[in-house]
Amino acid sequence: MRLLKPNDISPSEITPPEIYRERRRFMQGSIALLGGAALAAAGEPQAATRIAGVRASAYKLDEDKTPYKDVTTYNNFYEFGTGKDDPAANAHTLRTRPWTVRVEGEVKKARTWDIDALMKLAPLEERVYRMRCVEGWSMVIPWVGFPLAELIRRAEPTGNAKYVEFVTLNDPKQMPGVRSRVLDWPYIEGLRMDEAMHPLTLMAVGLYGEVLPKQNGAPIRLVVPWKYGFKSAKSIVKIRFVERQPHTTWMAAAPSEYGFYSNVNPQVDHPRWSQARERRIGEFLKRDTLMFNGYGAQVASLYRGMDLQKYF
Ligand code: MTE
């Protein structure tokens, strides 16, 4: 699978902030005039989708957040098409209720969680994370979620659980993209147990204080901010604890291009492009990509002694 390409956004695709603000003001005016319908059409959050009781957290960044509009209209979600605007256009057919997540494998307490129970499993927090796509663009997103570690503790993994595999929904009736064979479905991702238990690893159920939009992986997705974005599997239906390293979708598609670890690393280039720099969506000039996407102080110890050129 060679679809993930470096992403050189032409300057004309980036809306200068003053025009963006102007457009927003205009939109807000029309929203006032037309009410909810215009609001929905604009892709802006609606009051009804706000998540109650979200706590602030210590995970903040001194960087501008990527506007809601960009976070929800510039996406990768191949189950809804391979274009950046396909998920926002097509994901309305995804049904997020009822929804269950099966937790199974090498655990003492296998269980099928209803999504609404899962959302109450632990206090929901807002965490602002840097996200870096393997294609070379990045965003800063205020997620709402809970640490995956909270779910893992309740499952009581056995000593054989060395990895966690994430399986996402594969339903051609709801997801037009899975009728095409661009990838092997379902989309599968995986983490080593210590990565999955790491306090930064989040199960996200929302962003910008709102219920997660369908194009961003509703109703629940993984967020691993020190790894390339494709590790952050969307619309998860199964979490399996396993002894062997999962065979992930992107490894199956192009093993020489997408490794299991996929840690953000400006010193390890993709075979077809450099990973040294990135374009923050909404910014004009490229910026340097940071080792582990800037989370090295928290996660570098997980990889001590490993050859990161080999285990890319
Ligand atoms: N999850 C599923 N199920 N299907 C996908 O195609 N794309 C991945 C990841 N999770 C993908 C997925 C990629 S390549 C990226 S960069 C991120 O989702 C994008 O997340 P975002 O659209 O919320 O920014």
Image (cartoon, rainbow, N blue to C red):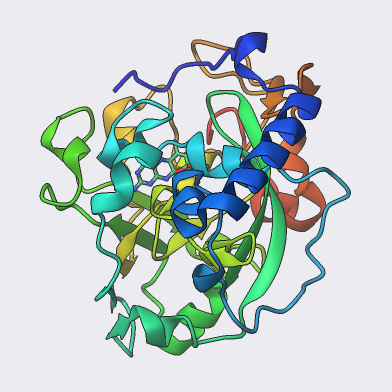
Query: In front: 281, or 276?
Result: 281
Judge left or right: residue 81 versus residue 19: left
Q: Farthest residue to the front: give it.
A: 33
Residue 141 vertical placement versus 165 (above, below) = above
Query: In front: 130, or 242?
Result: 130
Residue 174 vertical placement versus 230 (above, below) = below
Q: Quadrant of ligand 1?
A: top left
Query: In front: 188, or 268?
Result: 188
Badge count: 0
- Is residue 247 visible from the viewing direction of this image? no
Query: Which quadrant holds the N terminus?
Result: top left
Judge left or right: residue 212 versus residue 176: right
Q: Residue at x 39, y 60 (%)?
A: 218
Query: Which quadrant holds the C terminus?
Result: top right
Residue 143 coordinates in the image, percent (x, y): 62, 60
Residue 252 coordinates in the image, percent (x, y): 27, 34
Q: Residue at x 80, y 27 (%)?
A: 18
Residue 44 coordinates in the image, percent (x, y): 55, 51
Judge left or right: residue 210 versus residue 259: right
Q: Farthest residue to the right: give it.
A: 62
Asked which quadrant contains residue 176, the reply is top left
Q: Residue at x 72, y 40 (%)?
A: 25
Residue 36 coordinates in the image, percent (x, y): 48, 59
- Is residue 2 visible from the viewing direction of this image? yes
Residue 102 vertical placement versus 258 (above, below) = below
